[in-house]
Image (cartoon, rainbow, N blue to C red):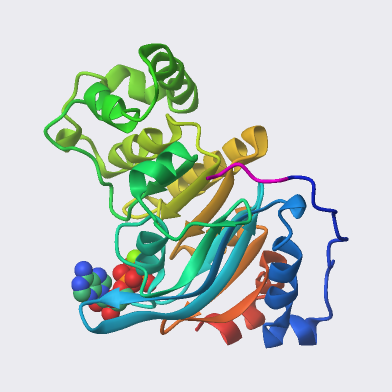
Amino acid sequence: MVGSSWSKQETPHPGPLPSAERESGRESARFLKWMQNDANNGILRVSELVTGYGKKQVVNGVTLGVAKGEIVALIGHNGAGKSTLLKAVFGLIRVWSGQVYLDGQAWPKLVPRELLRAGVAYVPQGNRVFTDLTVYENLEMGGVTLPNKERLREGMERVFGLFPALKDRLKQRAGTLSGGEKQMVALANALILSPRVLLLDEPSLGLAPPLVSEALGRIQQISRESGMTVLIVEQKVREVLKIAQRVYVLRNGRVSFSGPAEALKDEAKLRKVYL
Ligand SMILES: Nc1ncnc2c1ncn2[C@@H]1O[C@H](COP(=O)(O)OP(=O)(O)OP(=O)(O)O)[C@@H](O)[C@H]1O
Ligand SMILES: [Mg+2]
């Protein structure tokens, strides 16, 4: 299902647009059009997605795209629908309408296990680890979809290289770890699969300020080294803008701004679109 045809002809990148267009949101539309051609590396695309809980509609038609190797930040106030959107993309809640595309192909049935196999991993908000299991057992669970023990061993070695501190904690029950250590395990559980696309929900939650920069810096490093594509939800806006290339602001379940992260580094502009 994932196999994409790379035979389509490349079209030129639309390039930076005048700020008036960026502010009106048209930048996103042009970028998405460019990415619709999978030869242009559009790896993840969400089109007009609507979802919610019970009868309550929370995400009201979100369209966004992430190109291969890009880090894209999704920011917005509490309750804007950021986590809900990620859950829907990963198949944890039902998409009411709209479509998710991987490698330019529509995925009408979003099933977490199949998405994992296709190289999409998801780290939920809030240090989600199996508290009664040891760190080692948590990593085994993270790697459960890997085809054999050898790949699991390779995955473990890779995450120990990224988070050497984990090696000293392998026999410790994950429930007894500090918040930062739990976050590390949650991230390692996803990275053990060498995902092509990582959906990350507030990796900084519960981390002390210096650790926030460190954690986000680590994610940027992994993306640069392996070409991993990242869609990251973050409340630590200024921090995430340092590692993201582009940003979407979600307000009441709608994209209220999209553009290069650079555009929001100006404090006045950030306040205008975000506060
Ligand atoms: N399981 C649920 N059942 C019912 N309503 C929910 C559920 N989860 C979230 N909501 C509601 O959906 C809305 C969006 O929640 P969501 O968790 O997506 O926000 P968010 O943007 O991730 O916020 P935060 O930054 O605080 O994590 C909120 O009004 C919330 O109360
Ligand atoms: Mg959330």
User: Which x, y percent locates residue 185?
Assistant: 32, 35
Q: Residue at x 85, y 54 (%)?
A: 10
Q: Quadrant of residue 81?
A: bottom left
Q: Magenta span covers which residues?
A: 1-5
Q: Is residue 237 left or right of residue 124?
A: right
Find ligand 1 in the image and state its quadrant.
bottom left
Furthest toward the left, the residue is 132
Position of residue 123 relative to residue 56, above or below, is above
Q: Nearer the viewer, residue 249 or 90?
A: 90
User: Which x, y percent locates residue 252?
Assistant: 41, 84
Q: Nearer the viewer, residue 146 or 4?
A: 4
Position of residue 73 relative to residue 174, above or below, is below
Position of residue 43 relative to residue 183, above or below, is below
User: Which x, y percent locates residue 211?
Assistant: 43, 45
Q: Quadrant of residue 35?
A: bottom right
Furthest toward the top, the residue is 150
Q: Nearer the viewer, residue 38 or 53?
A: 38
The verdict on residue 261 being magenta is: no
Q: Residue at x 39, y 25 (%)?
A: 146
Q: Nearer the viewer, residue 81 or 119?
A: 119
Q: Residue at x 48, y 57 (%)?
A: 107
Dominant secondary structure, magenta: loop
User: Which x, y percent locates residue 208?
Assistant: 37, 50
Counting every numbered tag in the picture gives 0
Q: Residue at x 30, y 18 (%)?
A: 168
